[in-house]
Structure formats: structure tokens, C-alpha cells
Amino acid sequence: MEPNELITDTICAISTPPGIGGIAVARVSGPRALEIVDSVWKGKCLSGCVSHTVHLGTLTDTRGQELDQAVASVFKGPASFTGEDVVELSVHGSKWIQRELIATLCKAGCRIAEPGEFTRRAFMSGRIDLAEAEGIADMIASGSRAAHRAASCQMRGHYSAYIARMREQLVELASLLELELDFSEEEVEFASRQQLSALAGELYRSLVKLRDSFATGSVIKEGIPVAIVGPTNAGKSSLLNAITGDDRAIVSDIHGTTRDIVDDLVEIGDYQYRFQDTAGLRNTTDAIERIGIERSLKAVSSAHTIIYIVDLTDPDTALSDLPSTVGRNAEADLLILLNKSDIVSAGRIEETTAKVTSILPTADILTISTRNESDIEQLKTRLTELTDSHNPGQELLVTNARHAQALTQAAESARRTIDALSAGLSGDLIAQDVRETIHHLSTITGAITTDTLLSTIFTRFCIGK
């Protein structure tokens, strides 16, 4: 899509999900939006209507015959999502009605929108910046309250405003340095190096904090990976089934039943977790089972949380593998579940707890039975508490890999600015690092873009958005 097409083309698309539903919404945007819809509309003339009003009428099809009774919502530019004239047509959800409506609009002068083209027009018209546009995509894809909250913060501009404040401070820093260069012969100092260093240090810490939030933000967006590991027959598959409330994994007394990873997305509290039921850990000569065990250990290495299950009826097998298994990912949260508490004595539970503590003194231990619903609820509560601990009161979270990369580069150039100030280098060299930091921040909000970048971002959107 070339920039001049934004001026001449009027686009249309169905904005509701494919399939049959009670209502479907077609969106029309562009300089001829009102004119084109009026040509197939029987009712009050939409071109003469006040913006942000809703009207009842009838749509005609390509033959000029009545297609459906509809509701037209009118939004006149520039006070619309795209910045252009926009009409949204709500019709009955019949697939045929939807196809015929789009065909009628195209015959009247529209063309079908490309993926993400409505949002791209909103960006090109200055209604939103690039970070806000990406927030819209994340909002559509959000699968939990936490992901929705992060996307909403980005979509509503809070994230962009934070970036803008940092850019303003950097521009001020660069201005002071460049002013000194202009008056270098008079030896005028507009700000002490100590004050500039303090400002640069504050900005650097803000950049690092925001960049580091990507570790939490990305897993919240995609689903927090939780690896369920332990020996065969410890109750891993039973636990997955209890958490999901479904017979997701096969449960059997036969050792080695689970040979590959079985995963499922489950919403618990504010978060979405990606539970992975893994092959049981044991020595085996079975080639297929060995591959499954290798995948289990790989899942441990990439997990955000590890649930290690100890079978209370045979705890020593699990405890012998505990250090080497969880040692593969020291950064992950670890929950050790002492399972099958309903069929062992209190003495066995106390003895096993002591053994676990002797191996891992700070271990987070829960005693459960996968048959006990209250125990499963206790586990879910503990999981959300662990996740909350990684984001204590931090409203802004980076969930986008592109943003994380830009923040990493911005932090590196900010670090160089601090070092240059400490070393007493000339203002022109320091200002270059400051301008580089500004450049990297500008790529986040779209103040600096390329056609390739825009195409990559907006083609990920669904058609109609």
C-alpha cells in the first residue's frame, strides 16, 4: 500500500470473525466511504448525518434487490479510528449476506482491505503511533487478564507516553551539550558534567528496567510455560488432567506411558499458563522413550516455572534426580509437589519433606493429592503468587520483541553516554551517543520507520482490522 492510496482508495472488509453469528460488521473507510454506502443504502442519507451517530436502514445487493436490514454507524474524519470517513454496517451473520455485502460494496467502488490496513491508515493519519498499533494487535490476541492489561496499557498510549518523556529528557541533554559546542570559545557551561551524568544515569536505569520487563511480559503474552516433571508414575499426567478439568493426558500404571510432551493452555487467575506434561524421568533402553526424556529435559530448560513431582510412595527415585533436573534451569520458579498424600502416613510426608529440604533448603514444597480438588486450588493459588512476584506493581510491561531489541540498543548507547561523561570526552562525541539513544526510542513509536518495518507489522493483523 503506497501513501497516495490512503488518499484515493476506499476500502472495505468484514471486521467480525469468520463464520455464522447473530451479527456481522462490515467496515468501510476512505474519502468515498459515505458516498459508496449511500449508493446501496435505503434510509436516511448518511452523508448528511452528524458524525458518531447510528441509523437504521436497508442494504441492497449487486442486483439492486433488498439484501438485509442493517444498522449504519457513521464516523466522519478526522474524528474516526482511521482519520478518514468510516461507516460500520451491522448486518445479520449469514455467510451469504456477508459475501454479498462485500461484493456489493466493491462493485460500488470499494476495494477489499489488506490485512491490518485500517490500523495502518490510523497510524499514517497520526491517530495512533506504531506502539499503540501493535498494542491493538496484542489486545485482539490477549488470552488472559494480565495480557489484556498489558495490551490495553500499550494501546491507550501509556507506554508511548513513557517513551516520549524519556525522549524529551534525551533531547534536552543533547541540546545542552550542543549549546556548549556553539559557545565553546566563551567556555560557557550550560550544565555541570555531574548534573548531566545524573540525568543520563536516571535514563539508563529506566531503559534497563523497561527492557528487563520483557522477560515477564513475553511469557504473559504467549502463555507462561510450566514444565511438569518427575519420575514415571509420579502423577504428572493426573496433575495435568486435574488442572485442566479434562482427560487431556493418558493415565496408566504402566511405566513410560507418556513418551512425548502433552501441553495445554489454562487460564488461572489473571494469567494463562502453558502446562507441559513430560515423559517420566528414568533409565531406559527404549529408543522412543529416551527421545521423550530428552524433550522433557529441554522443556525444563525453557520453562518459566518447574513443577517437580515426588511420589510419596517411592520418594527416593525422585529425590536422586532432583538436583540434576532442576539445575538445568536455575532461573525458573520451582515448586516441589509431594503427591499421593492421601495414601501414605503423616510420618512419610514429614520424612520426605525433611529429605527435600536437606537437598534444597529454600525449596517451595506443597503436599497434595491430585484427587483432592482443594489441593489443586492451593497449587493454582501458589502459581499465581509466584507470577505476581515477578511484576510487583510495575504497570508497564514490554511484550514485543522488537521493542525489547530497541530498548537494549538504547540502553547500550545510554551506557556509552555515561562512560563518556565520566571520561570527560568532548561534547560532540557525547551528543552522538545521546542522538543514537533517541533514534532507537523513536523506532518504537514509529517516529522513525521504514516501509519494510510497516509491512512486517501490519501484515500480522487480521483482515478487517
Image: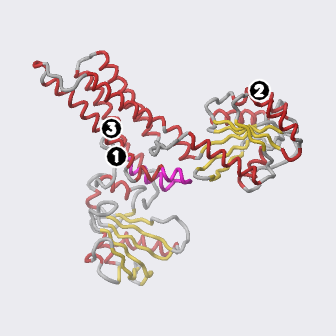
Q: In which quarter of the image is the C terminus?
A: bottom left
- In terms of depth relative to the viewer, which is nearer, 449 or 335? 335
Q: Give the range drawn in magenta.
A: 131-149
Q: Of the residues under marks 1 and 3, which one precedes in the sequence?
A: 1
The x and y percentages for residue 78 are 26, 62
Q: Position of residue 39 (x, y in %)?
A: 31, 78
Marks 2 and 3 sit apart, C-alpha to C-alpha, by 48 Å
**Above or below, comparing residue 41 to residue 126 in the picture:** below
Q: Disc 1 designates what residue? A: 161
Q: Which colour scheme is used?
A: secondary structure
Identify the residue position indicated by label 2 in the image. 358
Which element carries disc 2, helix, strand or loop?
Answer: helix
Number of numbered discs visible in the structure rendering: 3
The residue depicted at 30 percent of the width and 26 percent of the height is 433
Q: What residue type is labelled 3?
A: Met
The local secondary structure at tag 1 comes to: helix
